[in-house]
Amino acid sequence: MAKVPDDRRVPLFATDNLVRRIISPPKKLLSKYVASGSSVADLGCGPGYYTIPMAELAGPGGKVYAVDFDPRAIEGVAKKAEARGLERVVDARAGSAAEADFIPNGSVDFVFAHGLLCCMKDHSGALCQIKRMLKKDGLAYLSVTKFGRKKDPRTVTAEEWERMLGGFRVVSSGEGLLTRWALVSSS
């Protein structure tokens, strides 16, 4: 049996393209949670589809921590941030969301973990990091795909999803045809 990699790699072109921007404009979702001066963590940021709009919304007084296990994606985020004059706002680093210790404790207003948990094995590690970095009144947006191979340890079953949410106060939640999502706080 082939070894399953720790994190699932999604092709960069599939996560940041014009068609996706037309169908699902990132600022439409983010503007509900990210304001000028906000401190934000984009966990599993990929090539920055959400990161750069977050930085634009947070502005020069804000901070966006972008974390992805793929160094190529992080290089792309850094280049996009520099091209838009946002290099002081965006702190992009390659690494696991389960090991994002460089983000200070209780410093983040909003954590965005869209499709993160279903692409990694260490679900509990990532959730611990999210709880650790959130401010007392901070919010986190979590989402997972509903479908996956049962023997794949990255898959988040409906039962595991409910257990994950049990560690937070659920502000709102829902599910679509392909995904489950929740807006949560640590207390």
Image (cartoon, rainbow, N blue to C red):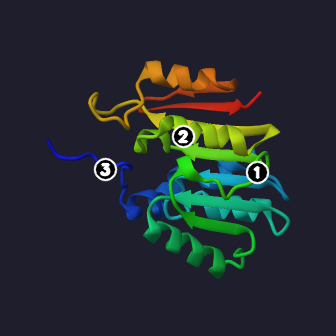
Q: Amino acid at mark 3?
A: Pro
Q: Amino acid at mark 1?
A: Val
Q: In the image, what residue occupies the spot 46% across and 68% down?
A: 71
Choose the circle earlier in sequence order: 3 or 2.
3
Q: In the image, what residue occupies the spot 78% across and 55% down?
A: 39
Instruction: Where is residue 88? Give x, y as percent.
Output: 75, 74
Nearer to us in this view, 41 or 36: 41
Please name the residue that numbered disc 1 is placed on.
34
Please name the residue that numbered disc 3 is placed on.
5
Choose the circle earlier in sequence order: 1 or 3.
3
Spatial CA distance of label 1 from label 2 is 25 Å
Nearer to us in this view, 68 or 49: 68
Please name the residue that numbered disc 2 is placed on.
125
Q: Quadrant of residue 140?
A: top right
Query: Vertically, is 8 above or below 144?
Result: below
Side of 17 relative to 93 (left or right)? left
| SS class, disc 1 | loop
| SS class, disc 2 | helix
Q: Residue furthest left?
A: 1
In the rendered image, the quadrant that contains the C terminus is top right
* Label 3 crowd (10 A; few <14 / some 14-19 / many >=20): few
Instruction: Where is residue 129? Give x, y as percent.
Output: 63, 43
In the rendered image, the quadrant that contains the N terminus is top left
Residue 66's label in the rendered image is none
Query: Vertically, is 20 above or below 79?
Result: above
